[in-house]
Structure formats: structure tokens, C-alpha cells
Image (cartoon, helix red, strand yellow):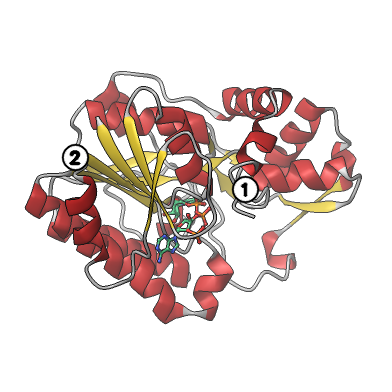
Amino acid sequence: MKILVTGASGLLGLNLCLSMEGAHQIIGVYRNKLEGTPFELVKADLLEDSACSRLLDQVLPEAVIHTAADANIDSCEADPEGARRLNADLPGVLAEACRQRGVRLIHISTDAVFDGSKGEAYLEGDVPNPLGVYAQTKLEGEQAVQAANGDAVVARVNFFGWSLSGERSLSEHFFYTLNKREKCFGFTDVTFCPMHVLDLASTLMRMLESGLSGLYHVVGSEAITKYDFGVRIANKFGLDASLISPISVEESGLRAKRSHILWLSVHKLSAALKADIPGVSTGIEQFYTQYQQGYPQKLRSYQQE
Ligand SMILES: NC(=O)c1ccc[n+]([C@@H]2O[C@H](COP(=O)([O-])OP(=O)(O)OC[C@H]3O[C@@H](n4cnc5c(N)ncnc54)[C@H](OP(=O)(O)O)[C@@H]3O)[C@@H](O)[C@H]2O)c1
């Protein structure tokens, strides 16, 4: 399949492109950070007028996976208008352009559309209640995609892995901080369902191949606190877990409000794919194996000087 991936320099986009390359023809959209990748690159600022239509007509993909976004919660709070253009308006424009051309679309959204107060696993039918600009604009992006293109998949994700900069994921934060023997915080009152980015990539591909459409929770099958996640990373890498101080997110001084319990059910996804959904334990194993194989250095070699 010929697949266009937006956000190819991002944590998800880069891992997605690398893992699908070979089995599929991958074209990654980048702005200025990438070079020398084993997959094809096309340079574009997606916020330029007609950028989506131009790209689709130039590349002629069979499917698009749209990962590009402002995924930084604090930068969204600082620039709500910019966040709205990228996270809310652009997905609708892309979804419409895909519909007009009969191109399949997977749009990446977030678990953070929920406020985390349910107390049990969120289902796809539960009503979201975003707490900040990032979550609000991502929810508007979901709605714009669904209004423009009923065949699109909207995938609410949460993931971890190695990134181009080494600074994009919570797993990298714990690893690099503890590896320098420095102290850090782990939130005991924030629960999430992280999925390793390679598991996410293969799950998204299976969704595409199965012809799914509509809203799905595409997260790991285990819920874990951020503190416990840090301890699991430390233990796997033989690092000192006592350097992680267990604290409440309310004491952290972080600017934007964060949801507490982002426990999402993957039952709908599991039933649609007739498969078990991987959890965090196998994901941390993969994260460790990639490290041993020099994967972080390989990613860095694609960074434009
Ligand atoms: N990280 C998480 O744990 C998490 C959790 C839930 C949901 N998500 C969602 O997952 C998706 C991917 O997140 P991520 O962490 O991989 O993001 P990321 O690492 O911050 O990457 C964002 C990507 O978007 C690109 N981009 C931004 N503005 C653009 C523009 N105007 N034109 C073209 N490209 C543009 C960036 O390109 P440059 O490198 O050139 O800036 C970058 O490649 C997002 O939709 C995010 O909301 C992420």
C-alpha cells in the first residue's frame, strides 16, 4: 500500500514510517528536521493554503496517517489560536481532501479528551470533557474529521518509545534522567495506558488492512500510574528507582491542568481486530531491546544538521 504519513519527524510519525517501510511504500511529510531516512520524504508546511490537496495530488497515496499536531500541552496553552489551526482545523481540511479523492484516513487523537474522573475504563461512547487547550483542540479535530469523512478512523492513542530528539516521550525522560543519576518526579495520581510505539504502528496497520472506520481507543491494555511506569523503566534498565520521588501532579507546578485517570477500554478494538491488544510490559521489553540494538542512535542519524 502507498501510505502518506504526516509528522514524519515526530515521535509517532518517525517510528511509524520506519516500522512500515519495506512492507509498504511510505512517504513521510516533514518540514526541516529529517534527512537520509530509508523511506521517501516530501517537504511541506501543512498549514499553508491548499497544502493537503497539493500533497494528495502529488503523492497519490492510497491511505494517509495523520500524526502531525501540536502535541505539547504547555505550548498549546501559550498559543491557543495556533493550536486550533493545527489540531482542530487542519484535520477537517485533510479529511475532506481525502474523502474527495477516495483516500483512506487514520487521524490520530488523544486519550486526553477525557477529564479522568470516571473511575472506570472509558468507552468510545463516553462523553469527553477536555481540561485544557490541547485536549479541547484535539477533540475539535476529531469532530471535524468525523463531520467531513465518515470512512475515516479516529484513533485515540497514548504511546512511548525513542524519538529523534531523545526528548519526546516519558520513557525517554525517565531513562535519560536516571541514567545520569539525577532525581525526577513520578506522579502517583495520574494513570494512563501507554502502548509501545511499534505496537501502535502495527495495530494501526491492522486497522487499515481490516478496513475499519470510526472512533477507536488504541492504547495499551494495562493501566499504570506514571510513577509505577518510571519504576518499571528503571528496573528494566538496572537504574536506581529510588531517584524517582512519588508526588501528586497537583504539587508538580505544571502549568496546564492534566486529567488524573486516563484508563481507556480497548474492548472495541480487540473485538474488531479479533486480537489481544499488547500491554505495557511487552512494550517496556521492546523499548529495552531497541536500546540494546542502538535504535536511539539510528534515529538521531536521521536528524538534519
Ligand atoms: N506523545 C504522546 O504521548 C501522545 C499522546 C496522545 C496523543 N498523541 C497524539 O499523537 C500524535 C503524534 O504525537 P507525537 O508525540 O509524535 O508528536 P511530536 O513528536 O510533537 O511530532 C509532531 C509532528 O508534527 C509536525 N508538524 C507540526 N506542525 C506542522 C506543520 N505545520 N506542517 C507539517 N508538519 C507539522 C512536526 O514537524 P516538525 O518536527 O517539523 O515540527 C512533527 O513531525 C499527535 O496527534 C498527538 O496529539 C500523542
Query: Residue farthest to the right?
Result: 181
Asked if the residue at label 1 sits under 8 Å from ligand 1, the reply is yes
Q: Nearer the viewer, mark 2 or mark 1?
A: 1
Q: Image check: 92 left or right of 123?
A: left
Percent x, y of residue 53: 19, 60
Which type of secondary structure does the marked residue at label 1 adopt?
loop
| Residue at 28 percent of width and 23 percent of height | 273
Quadrant of residue 133 within the rendered picture? bottom left
User: Whole-percent x and y of residue 171?
Assistant: 67, 42
Q: At 55% across and 45% down in the image, what residue appears?
A: 192
Q: Please state the horizontal and vertical placement of residue 225, each as a whole percent of the image.
A: 64, 43
Report the residue at 60% width, 49% height from top.
303
Q: Nearer the viewer, residue 55 or 263?
A: 55
Residue 233 vertical position relative to residue 100 in the rendered view, above or below: above
Quadrant in the picture for the C terminus: bottom right
Does 174 appear above or below 112? above
- In the rendered image, is residue 137 in sight? yes
Q: Identify the mark at residue 169; answer none if there is no mark.
A: 1
Look at the numbered disc 2 and give the secondary structure of its residue: loop
Does residue 169 sit above or below 295 in this rendering? below
User: Residue flagged by tag 1: what amino acid is it?
Assistant: Ser
Q: Which mark is residue 213?
A: 2
**Disc 2 from disc 1: Cα separation:** 28 Å
